[in-house]
Image: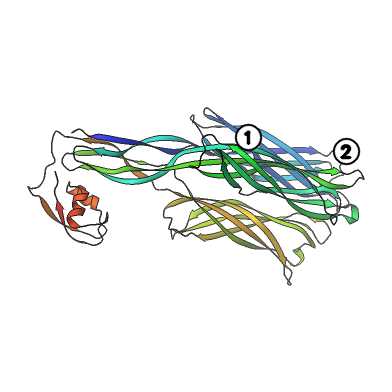
Amino acid sequence: MDLKLTKETVPAAEMIYDGLQEQPVELDYILPDYCPDIFRLVRCEALPVITEWAVSGDKLTYELRCDIHILYCGEDGSTVQSVDQQRSFTRTAELGKSVESPEVRISAKTGHVNFRAVNKRRIDLRGAVSVKISVAGQHQQEVISDAEGLNIQLKKVPVKYAAQRLNAVKNVHIEEEIELTAAQPDISGIISCRCSASGCETKLISGKLLAKGEAEVELLYAGGSGDTMTVEPMSFSLGYSQIIDVDGLDDSFDCTVAPEVVSCDISVIGGRDGDNRVLRCEAELRISCRAVRTATVLIAEDAFSTVYPCNAEISEIKAEQIPVIYDESFRNSARLAGGEDVPQNIYAMWSEPKNINAHIGDDGHSVVISGMLVYSMAAKDRTGSMIMPDREEAFEETIGLPDNIGSSEVTAEVRVRETSYDISAEGVLTAKADLAVKLSVYSSDSIKAVTDISVDDSSRKERDGDYAIKLYFGTENESVWDIAKRYSTSVSAVMEENELTGERLESGGMLLIPIVS
């Protein structure tokens, strides 16, 4: 009887490109005539965002936009003025090879920004933005799932893998007008605006994905004018509900949806009476959907023939793994100032995480997260001047997980839920940040799989004697497969003869090894 092999195709993720690109950002800005002279610079923010990207052949092309927001005070020292500019760049990354159905992950962050007033009318800015890019494709791996004939024995193991994945991206535009309450003063200028989008609800309807969520907007505006000017915090939510077309999607897929803010523009609508009490908010979100259908297949991990010399080609493969998601939270606190360094008045405080790293703890069932938290505030110092300082605080947090995750890879997404502050009776300013963490834990173990089997049926295995049964002293936890392979017999025969119930010996002792042919 000839040897018949059955093969399965297991897809594996293949990293095509994983790199970092740097983009210089420069601005030489002369104030228009209607702006007052620069007396003191207050703050500068350069916020980068990837607006779009495309893969063509072996190249990735993307558009990078950097929103620059500079605040300064004129000679009166109280009124805050703003300068808003944009810089756009088109960049290309050479991937090294073409890839079908690429999965692109691309993000931008500010490396450094230095700015100065060259004179009373001119601002000079020099900075850099770093863009992290990873592009993954798929390649197919053929492995043996079954074999029969020539007394072949297979050791099979189940493998769970990503059998199919779908990706879709949709940009959503939201416009909304917000009217101030009676207790809020008129708007004389926007000082800062921050917009964030957390996770959203999803639902599959007739082969389409419904994504529903909110974007949170927090802003500071200058109210009143002159000596009566105040700084007012304000927050509101922008809701969205969108249907995303994902070709081939059905309820056999697991979906993850990640919203990202592309832009958020705030403008003031003047009333008929000359008052400024209505804000128009225009936001753009990019909603990225990743859908994965999992499958499980039995593959051969090892093989031998009980009668003939046999060679099994074994390779290490890595099936695309499905991460286990854990949602956790923790709190960070930091001492920001004390005594005379505490501002006279704090209008608002916020914080942002950066340089996040995560790794599996030494105990195998915890994750260690470290990084920096940047605490920022808008305040008035003891001279009555507007200040917006930043303070970086390093943190490290160990989060225990319910399962023993062993040797794995982990990524962490950290976002700030809420930032608060307190000034003690002793005059110490302390800030607290409540952080939400989404951990994605991946199995990092490669799988040993038989990719081919060859049997020499022209000769038989030589035995050290003519016997039907052999005595063997096994050790605790020894593999029955290894014993059977050593004596060229079948696993089922060893287990049946010794009334074994598991694939490993529960205790050491004498075994009867039946010889099969």
Left or right: residue 468 compared with residue 67 = left
Q: What residue is rendered at 52% in x and 27% in y?
A: 57
Which amino acid, mark 2? Asp
Residue 106 can be seen, yes or no: no
The picture places residue 354, in percent across and down from the top left corner, at 61, 51
Q: Earlier in the sequence, mark 2 or mark 1?
A: 2
> What residue is at 56 percent from the left and 38 percent from the top?
206
Residue 223 tag number = none
Apparent side of residue 124 relative to residue 405 in the rendered image (left or right): right
Q: Nearer the viewer, mark 2 or mark 1?
A: 1
The Cα atoms of the two marked residues, 2 and 1, are separated by: 35 Å
Q: Is residue 215 left or right of residue 181?
A: left
Residue 230: tell me if it is visible: yes
- Residue extending farthest front: 206
Q: Residue furthest right?
A: 273
Circle 1 SS class: strand
- Apparent side of residue 460 relative to residue 117 in the rendered image (left or right): left
Count of residue discs: 2
- How would you rate the neighbour count of disc 1 (Cα within 10 Å): few for under 14, some for 14-19, many for 20 or more? some
Name the residue tied to disc 1: 52
Q: Nearer the viewer, residue 247 or 440?
A: 247
The residue indicated by pointer 2 is 33
Q: Nearer the viewer, residue 422 or 306?
A: 306
Q: What amino acid is at disc 1? A: Glu
* Coordinates of residue 252 in the picture (x, y in percent): 48, 42
Q: Quadrant of the C terminus?
A: top left
Q: Pointer 2: residues within 10 angstroms few (<14), some, or many (20+)?
A: few
The front one of 468 and 187 is 468
Answer with the quarter of the image where residue 70 lies: top right
Question: Which quarter shows the N terminus?
Answer: top left
